[in-house]
Amino acid sequence: MINQELIGKWSTPVENWIERGAVRKFAEAIGDPNPLYVDETYAKKSRHGRLIAPPTFARTLDYGVIDGLVIPTEGLIHGEQQFHFERPLYVGETIWCSYRLGESYSRSGSLGKMIFLIFEEKGVTSQGEILFTSRSTVIMTQGSDT
Amino acid sequence: MRYPVGTSLPTLIKGPITKMDLVKYSGASGDFNPIHTIEEFAEQAGLGGIIAHGMLSMAYVGQVVTDFAGTDADLIDFGVRFRAMVRPGDKVICKGTISKVEEKEDGEYVYLQVVAETESSQVVIKGNATLRY
């Protein structure tokens, strides 16, 4: 079971550099040829004035660790994912990312007892402005609780 | 109003997903959970074989939205529920519809409903997105 005292505790923010090569590889992996992610000349002329990252790239960043929080790696189901952006992620910028376990509750369902974990993440610029927030619902099934 | 409510976005068909696509996504995303890449592991986990990353399908649906937005609009909100598993060999058919348009102080907001389904019409993702023009 999840230690209830850890709920709401933020991880120490981690510095993430939005690397051009990483964004290009990600865009390739999702098969998205959007020139805003890879074509510098095109992107410079766009409203953003630079290359940007695909929205779901935010999920790949390092959000740090919460001391004492142990989540099993097997038997987890990603139930929901939400992002809220103030603006796109810019290639070349530094974003400080952290997360917390917002809430946790259990329910009985078709898969037996399920524990719902609602994680909240945020990305903050070096100037301290919130760039994006996100929410991830992860479901632990009985098998993963052992 | 830029686009009337009910307007359908161009459908995007991704796949059929290959195991190599999942290897590439694992590397690019850093999600190396072996249920997405190692057949024996996925079998033992009771999944009946490899399953695709949910976030890969979300990225596919995201492409429908960002293609529509082009360089004119910003994606403000994007959220999905993962409804069913996607497996190698599946095509993921991604669709979007405009559900609401709202004029606000800082721009025109276009609300979209998005869905991804397999060829057999199994819904794998349902969600929504908000664009600001």
Image: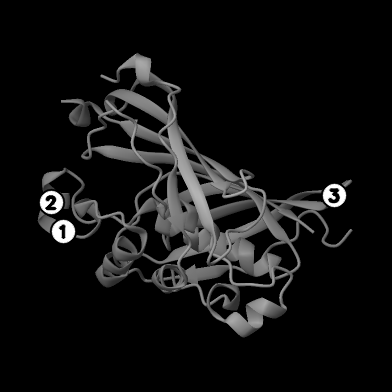
Q: Position of residue B17 (x, y in %)?
A: 34, 68
Q: Is residue B79 left or right of residue B130?
A: left
Q: Residue at x 33, y 37 (%)?
A: A65
Q: Which residue is mark 2?
A: B41
Return the residue found at the far front. A127
Please report the residue visible at 44 percent of the width from the left and 40 percent of the height from the top. Answer: A13
Colour scheme shown: one colour
Circles 1 and 2 on the same chain:
yes
Residue shown at the point (55%, 53%) measured from the top left = B115
Q: Earlier in the sequence, mark 2 or mark 3?
A: 2
Circle 3 sits on which residue? B106
Q: Are marks 2 and 3 on the same chain?
A: yes
Judged from the image, the secondary structure of the residue bearing numbered disc 1 is loop
> Judging from the image, what secondary structure is the residue with disc 3 in?
loop
Write down the quadrant of residue A6 in the picture. Answer: top left
Chain where mark 2 sits: B
Name the spot of residue B61 as percent of width and height, x first.
53, 59
Marks 1 & 2, CB-CB < 8 Å contact: yes
Task: Assess disc 3: are there few (<14), some (14-19) or many (≥20) residues with their C-alpha within 10 Å of its C-alpha.
Answer: few
* Separation (CA) of disc 3 from disc 1: 48 Å
Amino acid bearing label 1: Ile
Pick the residue in front: A24 or B125.
Answer: A24
Q: Quadrant of residue B52?
A: bottom left
Q: Residues within 10 Å of mark 1 (few under 14, many from 20)?
A: some
Mark 3 / mark 1, whichever is N-terminal: 1
Q: Is residue A123 above or below residue A10?
A: below
Are dots 2 and 3 in contact, CB under 8 Å?
no
Which of A25 and B23 lies nearest the eye of the viewer? A25
Disc on res. B38:
1
